[in-house]
Amino acid sequence: MVYLGYMFIFLGALSFLISAIGLLRMPDVYNRMQVGTKSTTMGTLLVILGAICIEPSWALKLILLAIFILLTNPLSSSVIARAVHKDGAALESDEFKEVKK
């Protein structure tokens, strides 16, 4: 069970790495926010699942933490997106993508 926990933790860390690369590669703030929210939520949940496999006595606390993360990450992302939209941030245009290539 411990090795399964380490595998989940490794997959969570890999998800964080993919999220960091996605933040650097995405063209505008909306895409960056989507990558940052989804990948880090999945990475955090995988790390929590790995910790539950390694230390089952912490399961109740970690499940409560996972529920909190599942409830707050989408909400915070939505609030940030709304603030960015009200501030007037624009999507990257298709013309810029063609010039960028």
Image (cartoon, rainbow, N blue to C red):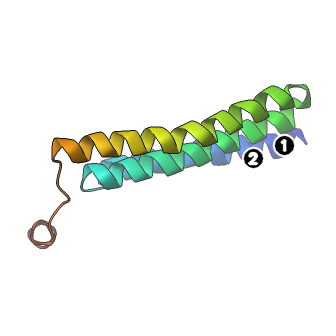
Q: Is residue 37 left or right of residue 70?
A: left
Look at the picture and state if 26 lies above or below 57. below
What residue is rendered at 72% in x and 36% in y?
Answer: 48
Q: Residues within 10 Å of mark 2 (few under 14, many from 20)?
A: some
Q: Is residue 57 left or right of residue 47?
A: right
**Front position in the image: 54 or 41:** 41
**Front position in the image: 3 or 71:** 71
User: Which quadrant is the N terminus positioned in?
Assistant: top right
For mark 1, give the secondary structure: helix
What residue is rendered at 75% in x and 31% in y?
Answer: 64
Tell me where residue 52 appears, x and y as whole percent: 82, 35
Tell me where residue 77 appears, x and y as whole percent: 43, 43
Look at the picture and state if 92 lies above or below 38. below
Tell me where residue 5 appears, x and y as whole percent: 80, 41
Does the rendering let one see residue 55? Answer: yes
Distance between the alpha carbons at the discs numbered 1 and 2 = 6 Å
What residue is rendered at 63% in x and 44% in y?
Answer: 12
> What kind of residue is marked 1?
Tyr
Look at the picture and state if 28 lies above or below 43. below
Residue at label 1?
3
> What kind of residue is marked 2?
Met
Check residue 83 in the rendering and tell me which mark sits there, or answer none.
Answer: none
Q: Are marks 1 and 2 in contact (CB under 8 Å)?
A: yes
Q: Is residue 10 left or right of residue 74?
A: right
**Front position in the image: 20 or 29:** 29
Indicate the quadrant where residue 56 lies. top right
Check residue 7 in the rendering and tell me which mark sits there, or answer none.
Answer: 2
